Image: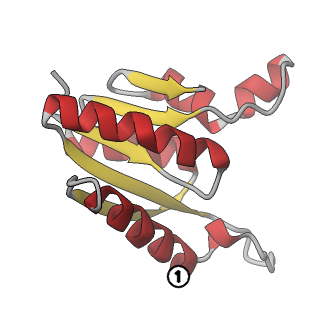
Amino acid sequence: MFKTVLFPIDRSRETQEAAEMVAQVVQQNGSRLVLLSVVEEKAQDEASTDPMKSTEAVAKLLETAKASFSKQGISADTIEREGKPAFVICDVADEIGASLIIMGCRGLGLTDEGATESVTSRVINLTPCPVLIVP
């Protein structure tokens, strides 16, 4: 049913919790797994210590996740991109022909402003395929 599953990852607890669901879906459907991590753009004058703005940290995160799935007998392809996470996730989903995106849910709050700013919310609104949100 789900030929290709895209799993965008970051360092959040929600991503770690979603990994179990990803493994189940991929194994049950014999899906191809693609791990994606986005190096967030930073302003030219910004000196950030955010690890998701470092290509080295993101590459290490992808390799760690790939090794974790490998221990479960799941091979995974990895993609590292730079940009705004929600847009990159949707672009990559379209490029690889993803039939499902699985994401952890990390809300910014219960206000309308918080909901419109979350990566998850933006992906749901822009995606070319179904999205499974793991609470």
Q: Horizontal and vertical percent for residue 47? A: 80, 80
Q: Describe residue 2's horizontal placement relative to residue 108 as left or right.
A: left
User: Front-most of 116 and 36?
Assistant: 36
> How many numbered discs sit on the rendered protein?
1
Of residues 74 and 127, the one nearer the viewer is 74
Check the image and report above or below for 132 versus 21.
above
Give the secondary structure at mark 1. Answer: helix
Residue 102 place in picture, x, y as percent: 42, 34
Seen from the viewer's position, the closer of residues 89 and 108 is 108
Please give the name of the residue rendered at 25% of the width and 47% of the height, measured from the top-left corner.
33
Dividing the image into 4 quarters, which one contains the N terminus?
top left
Compared to residue 35, the image places residue 3 above or below, namely: above
In which quadrant will I find the C terminus? top right
Query: From what the image shows, is residue 92 above or below residue 109?
Result: below
Q: In which quarter of the image is residue 64?
A: bottom left
> Is 125 on the left-hand or right-hand side of 95?
right
Residue at (28%, 53%) from the top-left corner?
Answer: 72
Q: Say which residue appears at 33% left-offset and 41% top-offset.
A: 23
On screen, residue 43 versus residue 100, left or right, reads right
Residue 68 lies in quadrant: bottom left
- Check disc 1 and give the amino acid type: Glu
Label 1: few (<14), some (14–19) or many (≥20) C-alpha neighbours in 10 Å: few
Residue matched to label 1: 56
Where residue 78 appears, x then y in whole percent? 31, 62
Q: Looking at the picture, how far across and down is residue 95, in whole percent? A: 25, 45
Q: Residue at x 53, y 28 (%)?
A: 134
